Image: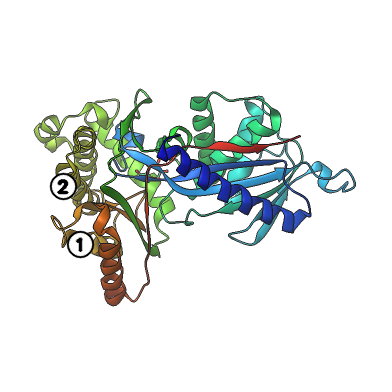
Amino acid sequence: MSLSDEHVEEADDALVRRAEVLFGKRFGRPPRWIVAAPGRVNLIGEHVDYNDGYVLPMAIERHVVIAADRPQASDEDAESKISLFSTALRETADFAPHDDTPSEQPTWHDYVRGVVAECRAAGLEAGPLDVVIDSSVPLGGGLSSSAALEVATATLLEAVSGDTLDPLAKALLCQQAEHRFAGVPCGIMDQFSITFGQRDHLMLLDCRTRQIEQVPMSEGDISVLVINSNVHHELTGGEYAERRRQCEVAASRLKVESLRDVSPAALAAAEDRLDATHLRRARHVVSEIARTAAAAEEVAAGDWVSAGRRMLESHVSLRDDYEVSCSELDLLVDLASRNLGQGIFGSRMTGGGFGGCTVTLAEARRVDELATAIARDYERETGITPSWFTTRPAAGTRILRESG
Ligand code: GLA
């Protein structure tokens, strides 16, 4: 058995044990099914998935775990419902398995409800369930805790129904649930990285063709450091949809199907067709797609210095042209950059923005010391205590237990 296989098994054991204990505490019996789905971090390729571009994310060693069983026959009330308990939020919710009307004010359980509804449309019936949801993916930190919940739910429904979804259809169905039930017009990056993640691989995803190239990252000397700014500016919902619309307007003024069809040189030659805001948005997207393709090659060649430089360029572009960063993320990136060439290769905001996390490439042997120093300086300047962890690229969603 290779080292990485052992790691996967150890992580799985811990997840199974925790889910078992939590389910047992609530329902007084062991769960029949346990599934897990990881969060994700995006190394580079931000806000380009809905522009048909390239993204380079990876699944992380933080998971949403779901433990479930059929309700006991003695409990007639529960027998017609899906009853959820979220350990992170300490909240319960229940709904009928065939209820497929989106809520006016979406909240956490709408992600589950949405996936149940979309699975039903795809021929997978959930039926009544007792469910405990546990998570080590920080909520609202830009690490796709909601997409992890969606994909974990779809994986649970596969286990429960005994049917398997085509993984591509599964990822798309989860994206559809997010559009319809959470009201967020997200791209495909999150659901794809969580569904198709492979241990020790980054995923170069072409969001136009949906082709995936797994890029090996088994270099033990390099660490992926995730620092959570622990701020979340509540602008995100509307701002995300607005950015997406601005890209569509820019593409239509440039007479192309999407901004993927525009090269940096073509954009420079057509600047007068866009107003200042649309030009800035397009400039980010067009340059980010080119940066991501180049960074994937650099990572594959082990050229961390060049890939790291592109991450910093990506951050500047997101900050100045796309305007989705915030002062706390800028500070984290700035603090990391002060150690460029001394253990840090590159750093940038990751995910939708307006708070959440940065992702930093660092030398494994120095990463703890560097992260501690960055966290200390960040806290000194902002008064906010950040949290951080390092992670290797992890495996995608999976069923951990099916019994009975
Ligand atoms: C969110 C969305 C993704 C992607 C990123 C930005 O995470 O869910 O589809 O657009 O923002 O890259």
- Residue 320 coordinates in the image, percent (x, y): 20, 53
Secondary element under disc 2, as helix, strand or loop, is helix
Relative side of 404 to 158, left or right: right
Instruction: Report the amino acid beneath label 2.
Output: Arg
Instruction: Report the amino acid beneath label 1.
Output: Asp
Colour setting:
rainbow
The residue beneath circle 2 is 309
User: Where on the picture, by quarter, is residue 272?
Assistant: top left
Label whose residue precedes the other's in the sequence (2 or 1): 2
Secondary element under disc 1, as helix, strand or loop, is helix
Circles 2 and 1: CB atoms closer than 8 Å: no
- Residue 246 coordinates in the image, percent (x, y): 30, 41
List the single residue furthest toward the front. Answer: 1
The residue beneath circle 1 is 334
User: Where on the picture, by quarter, is residue 310?
Assistant: top left
Q: Residue at x 51, y 27 (%)?
A: 167
Circle 2 residues within 10 Å: few <14, some 14–19, many ≥20: some
Relative side of 249 to 312, left or right: right
Quarter placement of the C terminus:
top right
> From mark 2 to mark 1, how far is it between C-alphas?
13 Å
- Residue 173 coordinates in the image, percent (x, y): 54, 31
Relative side of 191 to 392, left or right: right
> Total marks drawn?
2
Q: Which residue is drawn at 21% across and 30% down?
A: 254
Confirm or reject: label 2 Cβ below 8 Å from ligand 1: no
